[in-house]
Image (cartoon, rainbow, N blue to C red):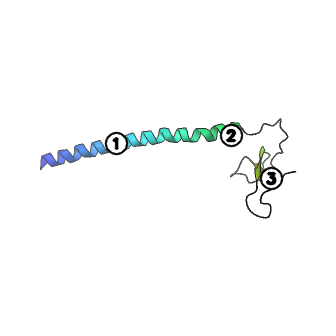
Amino acid sequence: MNDNNEELVRLAKDFLALIERANKINRSKYKDYKKPAETKRKELPSEDENVPRCPKCGGVMVKRMAKKGPMAGHPFWACTGYPKCNGTAKCEE
């Protein structure tokens, strides 16, 4: 009976080691997944371009295309601080 307990303990340790290894792999892949979003933020319009400031927070805005509602298919300015700030402005076409 003691041999069975030792075998169970060994298997449990092997299983925990496998789980820890999988977690390390997932963490490294998650870091790689986040990198494109970080580089995308750097590509936002700079202040020297003709870009309006957000009326709510004063941040930089980007041009977007409305997908729904009465303005669907028309461009508008959206705050880059979304979702913390949901400021928008009309866009002169």
Q: CA distance from mark 3 to mark 1?
A: 50 Å
Real-space Cα distance between discs 2 and 1?
A: 36 Å
Q: Residues within 10 Å of mark 1 (few under 14, many from 20)?
A: few
What is the CA distance from the residue labelled 2 to the residue labelled 3? 20 Å
Any mark on residue 75, and which?
Answer: 3
Give the answer, above or below, for where 42 lies relative to 1: above
* First-in-chain label (3 vs 1): 1
Occupied quadrant, residue 42: top right
Residue at horizontal 43%, vertical 39%? 24
Residue 47, quarter of the rendered image: top right
> Of helix, strand and loop, which one carries label 3?
strand
Name the mark on residue 18. Answer: 1
Left/right placement of residue 5 relative to residue 77 reads left
Mark 2 neighbour density, 10 Å: few (under 14) some (14–19) many (20 or more): few
Rendered location of residue 74, percent (x, y): 80, 56
| Frontmost residue, 47 versus 69 | 69
- Are the residues at dot 2 and dot 3 in contact (C-beta closer than 8 Å)? no
Q: Which residue is mark 2?
A: 41
The tag earlier along the polypeptide, 2 or 3, is 2
Which amino acid is tagged 2?
A: Arg
